[in-house]
Amino acid sequence: MQGKYDIALKLAKHAVNNTPSEFVTWAKLTEVYIDLADYESVHKRALEMYCGGHTYLLHLAYFFISFQALLTLNSCPMFTYSERDMHRMPTPARTHLPIKPEIVNSGIMEEDTGRDSDADPNLYRLPAPALHGTFNKAYSLLTRLVARIGWDELLKCRSGVFVMEEEYRMQKAVEEERKGSAAMEGLKAARAKRESLVAARREERLEEEARANGAKLEEEKRKLEEKEKEEREEKEKEKEKEKEKEKEKEKEKEKEEKEEKEEKEKEEKEEKEEKDEKDENEEEKEEEKEKEQNEEEGEKLAEDLEDVKLDDGEEKKQESEEARKAREQEEKLKSAALEQSYMEKPKQAAEEQKDLKDAASQPEHSFSFSNKRLCERWLDNLFMVLYEDLRVYTVWRTEVSHYKAQHMPYRKTGTEWEILGDLASRLHHKEEAKEAYQQCLDHKFSAKAWMKLLEIYADEGNVQKALVAVVKLTVYHERWYHEIVYPTVIAHNLNKLIRNEGLSKMQNMLISMNLPHPIFKLVTRYFAFAETFRVEGSDF
């Protein structure tokens, strides 16, 4: 009441710590957070002082307070509503409650004839009036919060505090993928274990068989080893033979090449000798004088032939060396090509492994819910109830503004006005609720509408209209033999006015209304109760 929200917050937290299983303490803490979230309350100055006048810091503070209010509301322990454990009386065949003559003669009583009882089915289907107990209280707290911060801000706070359905589905899909991969890995591990167990069992069986057979297995092993050795030796011998055959083939090729070269040389020599013989015959036929010259020339030719022979031997040697070098170069090129092809293969495999590592190292979509909580089912249902109320209220106010703009009367039945008044009252729109209840009373008498108007007039401090509502409700209760004075809605609201205005002022205003004496006596019972039990304000 005094605006000291910091002290109230500490006390509410202390109460929650002491009795965490009670709904009342959690509800009180939620109320404190909702009062802190009020933009127009006194604590705004304190927030401005702490935030240095920065608007974005103020908004962050309000969002934080709203988050806390929602989290606290979500933590409230809820209890199922149960009616009072009373014996049910059997329904009477007929009832007769005669009207007292003083009530009839007063002319104040209005009968609820049931006219204008028809209403739109959508208004009857609103789920909020069916809430009771802790759920009704929690819904009133939620409507207070939405009245303070608005529907859009409430949805933002809700998505910031609680895990939404889409986020939950995405997280669930990721978890299922992880579980699937983990299951596959588990299956692979199980298969590997089975294979290892089967192999171990086989080895054990072999060992057992070996122990049972004993020497036979050892002999067989020796034979197998000997056979393997013989096969290896045979293979080595075959390889050596093949190498020898290759060497022999190479030698034969070299010999053949040498023989071919020698044959060519012989042919060349024979051709040269024939030429020499022909030249000698021609020289013999020639003049004898030239014999000496021919002999000299023959000697020279013989010397040339010897030089040719030496040159041919050197050329053969050079040709064999060149062929050997060409073979060596060819072998080197082949071995280098094989080595190059052998080294390139691991490089490609390494690149593939690198690609796999890159693909595996790609970041996965992770959703961390460390700062969020799961919304309770009952609170989620209350959000849907609030949505229905806000939807109907928005349609109603839109229609009213449209009809006013068109200068046309907006008509509803008495029951519809009563339901709309309850709707506006639930959503904490007092002016609209007061207007709806007044429209309802213009169409028909409704004790509920008078009670709601009495609460509104008591909060506003409108004593005259509050006393009119008190008189109407007192006559109604007397008509139906509700003779209790306290605790009733009438006494509660009258005591509120007495605290603010004083008992003497209230009595004087009641006297100025010039009520019939029986009705005046009925109303003064509430004032007598306040004076007897010394209600605050009864002294002045």
Image (spheres, rainbow, N blue to C red):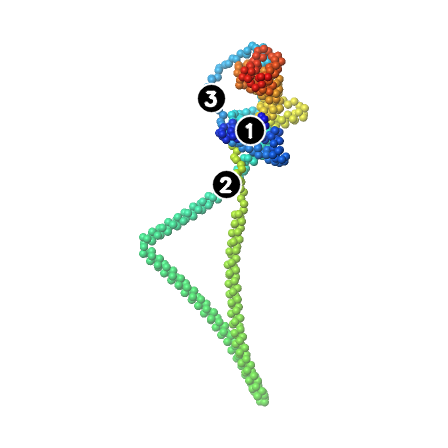
Give the position of the C terminus as an image quadrant. top right
Q: Percent from the top left, x then y, of residue 179?
A: 48, 42
Q: Quadrant of residue 393?
A: top right
Which element carries disc 1, helix, strand or loop?
helix
Q: Percent from the top left, x then y, of residue 239?
A: 43, 64
**Mark 1 or mark 3, earlier in chain:** 1
Q: Residue furthest front?
A: 539
The residue that label 3 is drawn on is 85
Q: Pointer 2: residues within 10 angstroms few (<14), some, or many (20+)?
A: few
Check whether the beta carbons of the residues at disc 3 and disc 2 lie within 8 A of each other.
no
| For residue 303, above or below residue 222 | below
Task: Please say whether residue 288 is visible from this viewpoint.
Answer: yes
Whole-angstrom CA distance, mark 3 to mark 2, is 49 Å
The residue that label 2 is drawn on is 175
Q: Percent from the top left, x then y, of residue 134?
A: 51, 27
Q: Percent from the top left, x then y, of residue 526?
A: 56, 16
| For residue 97, above or below residue 233 | above
**Nearer to me, 186 or 266:** 186
Q: Quadrant of residue 383?
A: top right
Which element carries disc 2, helix, strand or loop?
helix
Amino acid residing under circle 1: Ala
Whole-angstrom CA distance, mark 1 to mark 2, is 43 Å
Which element carries disc 3, helix, strand or loop?
loop
Q: Residue at x 44, y 45 (%)?
A: 187
Amino acid residing under circle 2: Glu
**Mark 3 or mark 2, earlier in chain:** 3
Amino acid residing under circle 3: Asp
Q: Residue at x 36, y 58 (%)?
A: 224
The residue that label 1 is drawn on is 8
Q: Quadrant of residue 4?
A: top right
Whole-angstrom CA distance, mark 1 to mark 3, is 36 Å
Task: Please say whether residue 383 is visible from this viewpoint.
Answer: no
